[in-house]
Amino acid sequence: MRISRSNAVSLGLVIVSFALAAVFYERLPDSIPTHWNAKGVADGYTAKPWGPFMQPLVMAGVYLVMLVLPRISPRGFRMERFQSVYEFLMAMLLAFLFLVNGLVLLAGLGVDVPMARALHAGTGLFFMTLGNFMGKVTKNFFFGIRTPWTLANDEVWLRTHRLGGKLFVLAGLALVVTGLMGYGPDFVMVLVGVVVVIPVIYSYVISRRLEGGSTNGEGSRRSL
């Protein structure tokens, strides 16, 4: 079976993450930081042997789950139509997790890592990437803005994802800038909440408009 370039990159990132953990294993302390609070201060530690391999295991799990999803997607909601986009975004998500893995290892080695800023800005970059490709995602059960109204109507799905894509790009840009400037997590939570809620409301509104237009059209034909 031929593996795509994006899929190969994803697999390579998973393998390299395990390799890095193995290479630095002996230099890492008995417990390494694996959780940070909202201010970027480590407040959770995991002991060896799991600590160094925690993030690589998460990456491997994400990779396997995302490989399976297209294969179990029900008929009528198949993901093959945007398979290349899906695999590219999978690679970008694993690249973000690979960044986290690198930061965790550096922190374990005693490097003063600006975890809050790095994750803040990294999330922004991922949002911008996701937003640029969101308009190419076709209707499915597992990926995208899945509401009762987008899943029920192809036009609602398309319009909602076009709007969502623009919002994600703008939100991602704002996250990168504010992350580098050192803004706190409250801004992130508010911004993500807005980006999530607006497309949901929009999908309902545009669905009602399309239904109203369809009803008015049927009424006009009947009157004729």
Image (tube, rainbow, N blue to C red):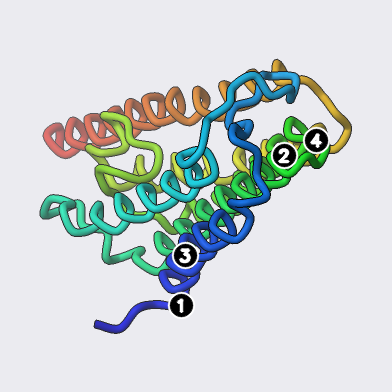
Q: Which residue is mark 1?
A: 5
Residue 14 placed where, x, y %? 47, 60
Secondary element at tag 3: helix
- Label 1 sits on a secondary structure element that is helix
Amino acid beneath label 4: Pro
Find residue 130 and report its horizontal and vertical position in percent: 54, 50
Label 2: few (<14), some or many (≥20) within 10 Å?
some
Q: Earlier in the sequence, mark 3 or mark 2?
A: 3
Distance of label 3 from label 2 (alpha carbons): 21 Å
Q: Is residue 55 above or below residue 87?
A: above
Question: Which part of the image, by quadrant, shows the C terminus?
Answer: top left
Can you say whether 149 is above or below 141 in the image? above
**Which one is in front in this view, the residue at disc 1 or the one at disc 3?**
3
- Give how far apart the Cα atoms at labels 3 and 4 are: 25 Å
**Upstream in the sequence, badge 3 or badge 4?**
3
| Sequence order check, earlier mark of 4 and 2 | 2
At label 4, counting other C-alpha atoms closer than 10 Å, the crowd grade (few under 14, some 14-19, many 20 or more) is some
Residue at 67% x, 50% y is: 27
Q: Amino acid at mark 1?
A: Arg
* Pointer 4 residue: 114
Mark number displayed over residue 15: 3
Three-letter code, disc 3: Ile
Q: Nearer the viewer, mark 3 or mark 4?
A: 3
The mark total stands at 4
- 17 or 199, which is in the foreground? 17
**Nearer the N terminus, badge 1 or badge 3?**
1
User: Separation of disc 2 and disc 1 at Cα?
Assistant: 31 Å
